[in-house]
Amino acid sequence: MKLNRKDILKALESISAPGEGQNMIESGAVTNVMTFGDEVVVDITINNPSLQAKKKTEVEILKTIHDKVYQKAKVKVNIKVDAPEKPQANQIKGKPIPGIKNIIAVASGKGGVGKSTVTANLAATMAKMGFKVGLLDADIYGPSIPLMYDVEGERPLAVNVDGKSKMKPIENYGVKILSIGFFTQPNQAVIWRGPMAAKALNQMIFDADWGELDFLLIDLPPGTGDIHLSIMQAMPITGAVVVSTPQNVALADARKGVAMFQQESISVPVLGIIENMAYFTPEELPDNKYYIFGKEGAKNLSEDLKVAFLGELPLVQSIREAGDAGRPAALQTATPLEESFEELTKNVIQEVVSRNKSLPPTEAIKITTMAGCSAAKK
């Protein structure tokens, strides 16, 4: 029997390829049909690369032609797989936050090194310098920024922005703040899996009325985990700052923190490393420095990793007291601490300037070139 090509095409209209809503002809899955007497060759392209999908497609084509056209037809099916390329799991797909010029992530390899304290004081110092600053407390499981800014118990209000309801950040000391701590009780543990935490962060990032900001600082949780990836996938980060103390245990984790940002699939520029609790100077011995946790460990690490050393901060009781009292130590005027935080903040801003001059703009957010600290506001 001589097979007719039109009969074959009509028969194939009754089946669909795996994952396709249309039949094989309408969807374009069948790319060619050739007949030679009682022989037929069907060329088909499917999107599902699994062996099961290929086998099922072949069986359905054979059965359909045998049932609807000719029971003894000799059928050959050539299956080509054209699966869409999968995006990299950790690829940054950030979308811009209108009005925010620079986003700085502050991280630490391990907890207890003073990352949140450093972040709080960096933000306060930037605001004191005249910048428009926002601070996102992304430490879902241990939010401490509300305490450090004396805004515990506050609740963000809803405001209408272009017909959409948005959260209005809490503001103190010239810094706009959002934290999961505003939505939980002080004695309430946040027991969330990754997807729920990521959803909460997305709401604080994109459903907030941040307004115009020169800098948005993000206080990340310690370590290198799911929250970090969620943040970096949610928005393009201008650069990251890693905080560490000088001892080897902390430095080992800080090294991992830097490596996380430098992974090819993440590629967030590391602005530099800050050494916290670098030394202790007793009040009665102002000229003495005691290196309780080791000397210049973070500085040596920065040289080893070829990233900038942004500065060191001493181990001072008043920094802890200021944080507990809800007024960052950097706001104390005419003190050595104020000078230390100003120097540190200037170094961070200068690294942002250098990053913007030497690297392409972060995806989806245009980074303006800044000449000195004041230009970052323009």
Image (tube, rainbow, N blue to C red):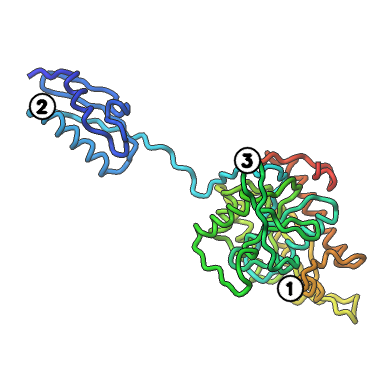
Judging depth in this view, the residue of 262 and 96 nearest the camera is 96
Measured from the top left, where is residue 142 in percent x and y? 62, 68
Mark 1, secondary structure of its residue: loop
Q: Residue at x 85, y 53 (%)?
A: 129
When the figure is inspected, residue 340 is found, relative to residue 54, above or below; the finding is: below
Find residue 55 and name its label. Answer: none
Q: Residue at x 55, y 47 (%)?
A: 265
Measured from the top left, where is residue 288 in percent x and y? 87, 77
Q: According to the image, label 3 marks what residue?
A: 363
Q: Residue at x 72, y 41 (%)?
A: 367
Q: Extreme bottom residue here?
A: 284
When the figure is inspected, residue 117 is found, relative to residue 80, above or below; the finding is: below
Q: Residue at x 85, y 79 (%)?
A: 282
Judging depth in this view, the residue of 372 and 129 nearest the camera is 129
Mark 3, secondary structure of its residue: loop
Look at label 3 and name its amino acid.
Glu
Measured from the top left, where is residue 77 in percent x and y? 21, 31
Specify the quadrant of the image occupied by residue 27. Answer: top left
Q: CA separation, marks 3 and 2?
A: 56 Å
Q: According to the image, label 1 marks what residue?
A: 294
Q: Are marks 3 and 1 in contact (CB under 8 Å)?
A: no
Q: According to the image, label 2 marks what residue?
A: 73
Judging depth in this view, the residue of 162 and 130 nearest the camera is 162
Apparent side of residue 22 relative to residue 204 in the rendered image (left or right) = left
Look at label 1 and name its amino acid.
Gly
